[in-house]
Image (cartoon, rainbow, N blue to C red):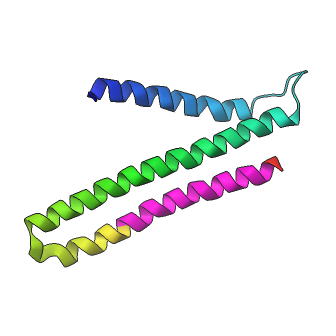
Amino acid sequence: MSLKSKLSLSAVVATALALVPAMALAQEGAASNKFDSNSWLAVAAGFAIGIAALGGTMGQGRAAAAALEGISRNPGAAARIQTPMILGLALIESLVLLSWVIAFFLQNKIG
């Protein structure tokens, strides 16, 4: 996949993700009820978890690949590379869990 197609795909995804929460928080019209905005909040929560999981797994994969490449080039530095890698993986995973908590709070707001 070329860089141009990756950028255009990411622009489409970013635009869609920017519009979904805006629709969830839009002003209610005459024919609107609370279930309309609640359904968009549920969609936004689902997108948040999906995008966070995708980004987290991509970040963890790149971090592990870079650490393994560094260890393969210099096996003597394995202990010094492994500790920051594990710390970085934990921080990446904490962001994914934070998005899960935010989505959970959005679901509680619906009820």
Residue at x 51% of width, y 44% of height: 51
Q: Quadrant of residue 98?
A: bottom right
- Viewport quadrant of the N terminus: top left
Question: Percent x, y for residue 81?
Answer: 22, 71
Residue that protrudes farthest toward the top in the picture: 30
Question: Looking at this view, is 77 or 69 the one in front?
Answer: 69
Q: Is residue 20 left or right of residue 84?
A: right
Above or below — where is 19 with respect to 105?
above
Res 82 → quadrant: bottom left
User: Above or below — where is 80 with respect to 42?
Assistant: below
Q: Main secondary structure of the magenta part?
A: helix
Identified at 36% across, 65% down, the residue is 88
Residue 31, position in %: x, y?
A: 89, 21
Magenta residues span 88-109
Q: Please tell me which residue lies in front, 93 or 50.
A: 50
Give the percent coordinates (x, y) of residue 66: 22, 58
User: Looking at the image, which residue is at 29% across and 53% down?
Assistant: 62
Seen in the picture, residue 10 relative to 87 is either above or below; the reply is above
Q: x, y (%) of residue 60?
A: 36, 57
Answer with left or right where residue 49 lies relative to residue 66. Answer: right
